[in-house]
Amino acid sequence: MTMPFYVSPEQVMKDRADYARKGIARGRSLVALECADGVLIVAENPSRTLNKISEVYDRIAFAGVGKYNEFQSLKIGGVRLADLKGYQYSPEDVTANSLANAYAQTLGQVFTHEMKPYEVEILVAQVGAEPDEPNELFHILYDGTLVDEHGFTVLGGRAESIAEQLGRDYRPDLPLADALRLGARVLAEEGGEPLPAGQLEVALLDRARPERAFRRIRGAELESLLAGG
């Protein structure tokens, strides 16, 4: 009689975590920064049609790194959940906190019970409607770990080295143009030139907009901001 093959639960979890981390590390990074105008999200993304950053609800944005089809399916689920909750109850009941917790539960369930974990890290960000209302940045890892970030956060790729650079140069009251140039600089290879507009996907949760705060920054506006305009 053959003995059944045994792998300890600790080894299974470690193998899954290593697998997910390696997949995420192969992708390009993304940063989110609180600035004077709201919450700026900057991603290295040369594609003009495959977006890493999206609107989820009126003042809430979603961003993801890693395997594109996996974080897109999470985004779609979040949009449906937000729309349903806003319709059944009130738009004020749809918050980044509630969405981030739902994403954390989903990713934790997949990581624990499915054969293959999701190779993703995601961000859920919400801008305050008033200057004294705080912004919210929630970073959700592949295993469902939920991190409440302040000031800035980095997802995927060279996250540690980028976070170290941001820690040296970031200020919470940066003007939009300065925050964007900082994002373009830290996403570049260390010591290299800042990423040009054609390599970036940029969106802003604009505090000054009364309802739908999400807007993309592209084209002439992006070029002007990167140039210091």
Image (tube, grey):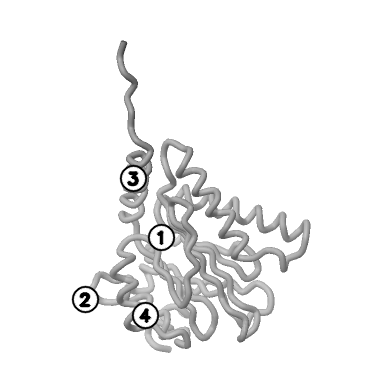
For discs 3 and 4, the disc positioned in front in the rendered view? 3
Q: Which of 106 and 181 is in front in this view?
A: 106
Residue 89 appears left or right of 37: right
Does label 3 or label 2 sit earlier along the sequence?
A: 3
Give the answer, above or below, for where 29 lies relative to 77.
below
Amino acid type, residue under disc 1 in the picture: Ser
Secondary structure state at the residue bearing disc 1: loop
Residue 116 appears left or right of 91: left
Residue at figure coordinates x 44%, y 74% from the top left? 152
Q: Nearer the viewer, residue 172 or 145?
A: 145
Q: How far apart are marks 3 and 1 (CA)?
A: 33 Å
Residue 10 locus on image (x, y percent): 35, 42
Q: Quadrant of residue 96?
A: bottom right
Amino acid type, residue under disc 4 in the picture: Leu
Residue 197 locus on image (x, y percent): 38, 73
For discs 3 and 2, the disc positioned in front in the rendered view? 3
Residue 137 locus on image (x, y percent): 51, 70
- Which residue matches tag 4? 182
- Which residue matches tag 3? 14
- Which residue matches tag 2? 191
- Picture disc at residue 73: none
Q: How far apart are marks 3 and 2 (CA)?
A: 34 Å
Residue at figure coordinates x 49%, y 74% from the top left? 217
Amino acid type, residue under disc 3 in the picture: Lys
Q: Looking at the figure, which quarter contains the C terminus?
A: bottom left
Secondary structure state at the residue bearing disc 3: helix
